[in-house]
């Protein structure tokens, strides 16, 4: 097969006459399979091949990556239809991403690449000091993984690069779930991550996603500001995201609730490394059942945070997802002492901020509580939103004060 980066040999694909070429010209990053002229030649294009995209009038739109196995049949890589997608190209994209992060953070612990929003469609890279974890969630990134790895080491100087293949999107792209060490050696155990004055333990080889959720950093910080002297309940805590930040800010005590024993063990180790183990407790179990049991015991806390997994990961699951968010709010609200605070989070891109807020307020009302909405939070600056891709702005956090 000819080199897909050779402009003389590059495959050309074309939009249908009724496809919205203007949206592509204005920055839309995706072409769906029903927008493209698909003949026998197009259907035989290998997954991850680099191609030239044209509109119906044969005017060039840019360089794209093609995957005929995916509903997203083409992803825009470069507005230049002659762009060469090689290690130098990756270096330029990664350097731009790194420059932004270095203006935001004084330590190298952050999301370095947030997919389309950083010009690398389907690619997630989280950095943990000298270690980077890559999720190549699109076929083109899998094909060009060697060039991406070389560029990542060149730009950042990391000595270990891990491939995490657990992303749900990889299945949609027809990719396998095999993790790998791309550079250096996998860490022997969890990695300590400093954030908001707390210490988090990230399992980079066996944990959820890439090992830690950097996106909640500003919401952890806001909750920490409410925590001095407070009793804190952190539900769906993972490795102690909100509870450890609260302890670092002076909470009197904190309880972390999660269904995963390994995640809670990491939370306990983080508390120990912070010297806060005497103020920290964990409880493993189903969050809905735990919230119900705490209410039956008439337990109350000064700050309750619920940060569940995505209840509405797609439009199809939106209505049951919104009912689940409402139920969480209804069960959590009675656990907040009068004058205390309730934080409710959603990482479901299908649930807009308006729909999530409505479900949350309805749940609080059904619990018989009155409240004030005091703050709305989103992901941190290392998780930029692509202006024409709502999915990249998935995280929402609502903070309420429960009125006496």
Image (cartoon, rainbow, N blue to C red):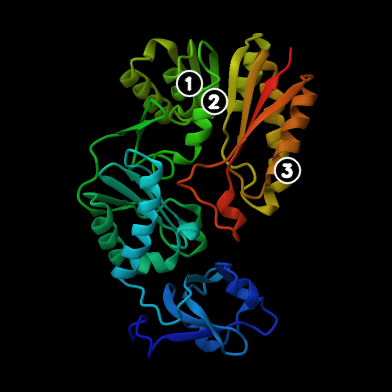
Depicted 112 relative to depicted 243: above or below:
below
Residues under numbered marks 1 and 2 in contact, where contact means CB atoms less than 8 Å apart: yes
Depicted 332 relative to depicted 308: above or below:
above
Which residue does the numbered mark 1 point to in the structure image?
Answer: 246
Depicted 112 relative to depicted 33: above or below:
above
Mark with earlier residue (1, 3): 1
Q: CA distance from mark 1 to mark 2?
A: 7 Å
Where residue 219 appears, as percent x and y from the top left, is 53, 33
Q: Nearer the viewer, residue 238 or 389?
A: 389
* Disc 2, SS: helix
Depicted 265 relative to depicted 8: above or below:
above
Mark with earlier residue (3, 2): 2
Q: Mark 2: few, some, or many residues within 10 Å (few <14, many ≥20)?
A: many
Quadrant containing the N terminus is bottom left
354 left or right, relative to 94: right
Which residue does the numbered mark 2 point to in the structure image?
Answer: 223
The residue at the point 34 percent across, 23 percent down is: 269
321 left or right, relative to 147: right
348 left or right, relative to 146: right
Could you tell me if residue 75 is visible in this image? yes
Where residue 348 appears, as percent x and y from the top left, is 61, 45
Numbered label attached to residue 114: none
Q: Nearer the viewer, residue 329 or 251?
A: 251
Where residue 387 appears, as percent x and y from the top left, is 59, 58
* Disc 3, SS: helix
């Amino acid at each position: 097969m000819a080199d897909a980066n050779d402009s003389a040999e590059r495959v050309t694909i074309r939009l249908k006459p009724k496809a919205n070429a203007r949206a592509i010209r204005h920055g839309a990053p995706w072409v769906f399979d029903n927008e493209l002229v698909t003949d026998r030649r197009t259907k035989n294009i290998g997954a991850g091949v680099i191609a030239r995209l044209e509109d119906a009038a044969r005017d060039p739109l840019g360089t794209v990556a093609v995957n005929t196995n995916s509903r997203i049949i083409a992803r825009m890589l470069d507005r230049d239809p002659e762009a060469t997608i090689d290690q130098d190209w990756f270096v330029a994209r990664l350097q731009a991403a790194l420059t932004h992060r270095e203006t935001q953070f004084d330590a190298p612990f952050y999301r370095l690449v947030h997919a389309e929003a950083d010009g690398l469609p389907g690619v997630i890279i989280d950095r943990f000091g000298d270690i980077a974890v890559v999720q190549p969630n699109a076929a083109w990134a899998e094909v060009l993984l060697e060039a991406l790895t070389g560029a990542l080491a060149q730009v950042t100087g990391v000595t270990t690069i891990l491939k995490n293949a657990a992303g749900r999107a990889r299945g949609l792209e027809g990719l396998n779930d095999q993790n790998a060490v791309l550079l250096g050696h996998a860490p022997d155990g969890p990695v300590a991550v400093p954030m908001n004055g707390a210490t988090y333990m990230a399992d980079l080889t066996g944990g959820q996603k890439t090992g830690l959720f950097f996106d909640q950093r500003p919401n952890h910080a806001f909750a920490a500001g409410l925590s001095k002297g407070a009793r804190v309940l952190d539900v769906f805590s993972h490795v102690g995201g909100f509870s450890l930040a609260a302890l670092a800010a002076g909470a009197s005590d904190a309880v972390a609730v999660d269904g995963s024993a390994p995640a809670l063990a990491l939370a306990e180790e983080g508390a120990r490394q912070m010297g806060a183990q005497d103020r920290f407790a964990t409880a493993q179990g189903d969050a809905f059942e735990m919230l119900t049991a705490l209410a039956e015991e008439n337990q109350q806390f000064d700050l309750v945070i619920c940060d569940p997994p995505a209840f509405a990961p797609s439009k199809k699951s939106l209505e049951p997802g919104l009912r689940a968010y409402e139920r969480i709010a209804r069960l959590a609200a009675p656990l907040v002492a009068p004058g205390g605070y309730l934080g409710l989070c959603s990482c479901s891109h299908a649930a807009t901020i308006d729909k999530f807020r409505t479900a949350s307020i309805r749940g609080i009302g059904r619990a018989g509580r009155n409240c004030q909405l005091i703050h709305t939070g989103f992901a941190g600056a290392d998780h930029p939103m692509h202006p024409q891709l709502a999915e990249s702005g998935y995280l929402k956090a609502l903070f309420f004060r429960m009125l006496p």
